[in-house]
Structures are given as structure tokens and as C-alpha cells.
Image: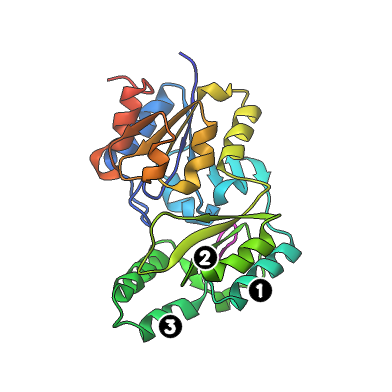
Amino acid sequence: MNRRIIFLDIDGTLTEPGTNQPPESAVWAVQQARNEGHLVFLCTGRNYGMLRPLLQYGFDGVVASSGGYITYREQIIHDCPMTEQQRSQVLKLLKEHGIYRTVECKESSYTDEAFKEYLQSHITEKGNSELLRWQEQIETSLHILPMKEYRGQPVYKVVVMSPSVQQLEVPRAMLASEFRFCIQDGNQAGFINGEVVNRKFDKGKAVEQVCHVLNVPLQNSVAIGDSMNDREMLETAGLSICMSNGSECLKKLVDDICPSVLEHGIRTAFFKHHLINR
């Protein structure tokens, strides 16, 4: 049996978005795959601190912050936060153009309180009450702190929530040489949701790095994801799988589609592609 390295996105793939509880079928499938000699990595946009509740289920390594921080067991493979100059420029430009920011450091994340204040003041508008509940749930479950508590720690990426595409145009153009703006499909109550990620890394480059360090051929890698921020990971891996609850654009790019998070998709994919035996 050829050893495979399996890369699993979290939100929308291993768990429902913003939660830390994978289905029992997925936990079992991961354990079985590791028992059969495969390596299983979390590969996510979340920072390392947000992963801690999931590490109890047993993984060989993590790709955190969209590839900005990578570990294999006790070994750090890659560590690439923004420079101080980059951080200052990114945060200043976003704020000047009315874009709400969540900065992700290694252990903690900090979000603009003004976003919730805006939603609360426009609570009667369609969708804003739902978005406010969603925002508060995410902050609680992932332990995201208010921006006033941020003390200048190194930042790996910035999650953005913009009232319009137009407000993103100038920051996107001015930062284009060093940063990618990864905009998600759809929106929340009219807001544009996305991430500002350093061009020095992405999930695809992370897959390559892990395979190189562990001396596993790239064709023996497997990636499972659901959203467009998984695109590079899926395009790089030897076998790419999208969840049925995932992006319609992404489904056109992958080798296979498996059932959704709540329909035992991870276990089904592992069985189908012989990563575990019945």
C-alpha cells in the first residue's frame, strides 16, 4: 500500500462552518486512515489557536492560516507572518475604505467591533439580524476577541467583510503585488466576505511543502475541501475531492464530489478511494 497524505479543510468539510465538532463518522475515518499508515493533516484558513479544540481527534500535522504556519507533529515546517510594514499597510488601507477586519495571529484573532455596531444600528434591514447572530456565534465558538485587545502580535492573514465590492477595489489594487484577495462565493446579507493572504504561501504550496519534507510523491496526496479558498490545495493534490455542500465553481475543477458534512462525506470519500477498508 502506498502511503498517502490526506489534507482536510475544516469549515464546511470536516465540520459545519464555524464549529469544532466533526461528525463521529469523520473522526472514525481519520483514525482508521492513520491506523492504515496514511498521514492526515488539517489544512485550513484558521489560525493555529483556532485548531486546538480539533487536535484532540488526532492528526499528524496542521496547515494553518492558509499555509502561513505548518507543523508536522512537533516540527515546524513553515512560519511566515506579515512583516510589520505589510501589516501596517494592509490594516490601514482596509480601515480607510470602510472594510471590517479580523486579524489572525498564531494563537488569537481580533475583530473590528465596529462591524457588530453597524449591524446593531441597522438591525431592521433584511438579513442583518441573521448576520449579527452568525457573527456572534463565530466569535464565541472560535474565541475571536475584540480589536481593542490586539497588541501588535504578528499577523498571518486578514479576514474581511466589506459592504460592497467597490470598497475593495482600491485596497485590492494597491496590495496586489504582495497579497491575494480571496473572495468567497455568495455573501452574507449583502456583505462581501473574503481573506487577504500573502502571495508567499497558499494551501497548494503547503501541500507541496509537506510532501517534499516527508518525502511522499505529490501524486500520493489527497485533498478534500468545499470553498474557493481551497482551490490551490485541490489543484495541487494528486486526488481532489469537493463536498456536495461546496462551491459550484469548485466542483467543476475536482476529480470527485462526495456527500456533505452532515451526510458522512469524509467517511464515504475515504471508503470510495480506498484510504480505509470496510
Q: Which residues are magenta?
A: 100-108
- Disc 1 is placed on an element classified as helix
Q: Residues within 10 Å of mark 2 (few under 14, many from 20)?
A: many
CB under 8 Å between discs 1 and 2: no
Query: Which amino acid lies under the numbered mark 2 shown in the image of this protein?
Result: Val
Query: Which amino acid lies under the numbered mark 1 shown in the image of this protein?
Result: Lys
- Disc 3 is placed on an element classified as helix
Displayed quadrant of residue 225: top left
Identify which residue, 105 or 45, lies in the foreground.
45
Identify which residue, 161 or 116, lies in the foreground.
161
Q: Residue at x 56, y 52 (%)?
A: 65
Picture coordinates of residue 277 (x, y %)? 32, 19
Picture coordinates of residue 148 (x, y %)? 56, 79
Query: Which amino acid lies under the numbered mark 3 shown in the image of this protein?
Result: Glu
- In the picture of the structure, the residue carrying the numbered disc 2 is 160
Picture coordinates of residue 23 (x, y %)? 29, 43
- In the picture of the structure, the residue carrying the numbered disc 3 is 117
Q: CA distance from mark 3 to mark 2?
A: 16 Å
- In the picture of the structure, the residue carrying the numbered disc 1 is 92
Q: Is residue 60 visible?
A: no
Looking at the image, residue 238 lies above or below residue 168: above
